[in-house]
Amino acid sequence: MNINREIEDLPEGMKKELPFSVPEGYFENFAARLHDRLETERKPGFFGKTYRILRPQLAIAATFAAFIILGYVIIKLSLDNNKQTEPIQEYSEIIDYYIYDFDDETIMAVFTDENNLNYLNNIFEDEEIIKYLSEEYDPDYTDLKDLY
Amino acid sequence: MKDYTDKELLQLFLNSGDRNHAFNLIVKKYQEKLYWHIRKLLISHDDTDDVLQNTMINAYFGLENFREDASLYTWLYRIATNEALSAIKKKKRRMFLNLEDVRSQLEKTLKEDVYCSGDDIQIKLQKAILTLPDKQRLVFNMKYFDEMKYEDISEILDTSVGALKASYHHAVKKIEKYLEED
């Protein structure tokens, strides 16, 4: 493949002139227009001047602020993580503590206290039970009496 | 007007008390070359004018720190190229355009801009060039229209000579194909 030969071949029949033009006097006036723009660029306004003077200090302040925010976020996140694990640790400690050290009475006490089931601790007489059941379901009283 | 070398112009800018005069000489020397370099990429005269001004302003503020390991000519071309490519990117972003839309936008400018005129063959070639990706367009323009050496283009675009030759070769093939089909 002869690249150079192909390069020579392309322009055949093609003009190397560009189909572009410029406004009259464009190049003659360009330097003057550029000079005016340079003057404007070199004379920044009040805010521009202040910004240029304070830019290094602003950059340092921004870096510090970024570090402080980053530090705060990291500390906050780690504290939140600790808070989330606390209850789990508490439960596991309670389980460890009580798992081998309870009996039926303890369980009953816990359930009745927590679920307002104190009536379970009451001792009922047979008569009272039969009366309660008969009121509730209206059974044949004679059958029940036979059972007891 | 005396023809100053780049080195002389730089010395004049850095060491003389009248920087404006020295910079004016630099502008006069390079304004046309840079204008046409940018114009071939942006097509519109107004966009080219903006980019050329930005190029010169960046050059003015950058000349103080200019290191002479690159020539002034290469350095200015590099600024102009970067400014022109950023202008295209900005336009894409601002108008939510994709590559195809940018192409048709540039084609529209080619038809409608009062400072775009030429015969059918010139317009046809420009349309063919617009089908190329931006970087390939850049290489093609620099080689074909400006007749720059690959070594110089390589320095400006920071690309190897081999890659530039390949890029130009692909560009030529695409343009040939476009012209045959059209």
Image: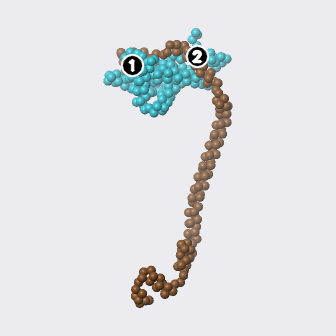
Chain colours: A brown, B cyan
Residue at point 62%, 46% (across, down) = A69
Q: CA distance from mark 1 to mark 2?
A: 32 Å
Q: Residue at x 39, y 22 (%)?
A: B127
- Say which element carries label 1: helix
Q: Which mark is residue B123?
A: 1
> For mark 2, what is the residue?
A32
**Which mark, by number, is residue B6?**
none
Q: Is residue B181 above or below residue A113?
A: above
- Residue B22, image x and y in percent? 61, 16
Residue at screen point 62% across, 15% down: B21
Quadrant assignment, res A92: bottom right
Badge 1: few (under 14), some or many (20 or more) residues near its Cα, within 10 Å? some
Whether residue A120 appears in this view of the structure is yes
Residue B136 location, x and y as percent?
43, 26
Three-letter code for the amino acid on which mark 2 is drawn: Ala
Discs 1 and 2 carry the same chain letter: no
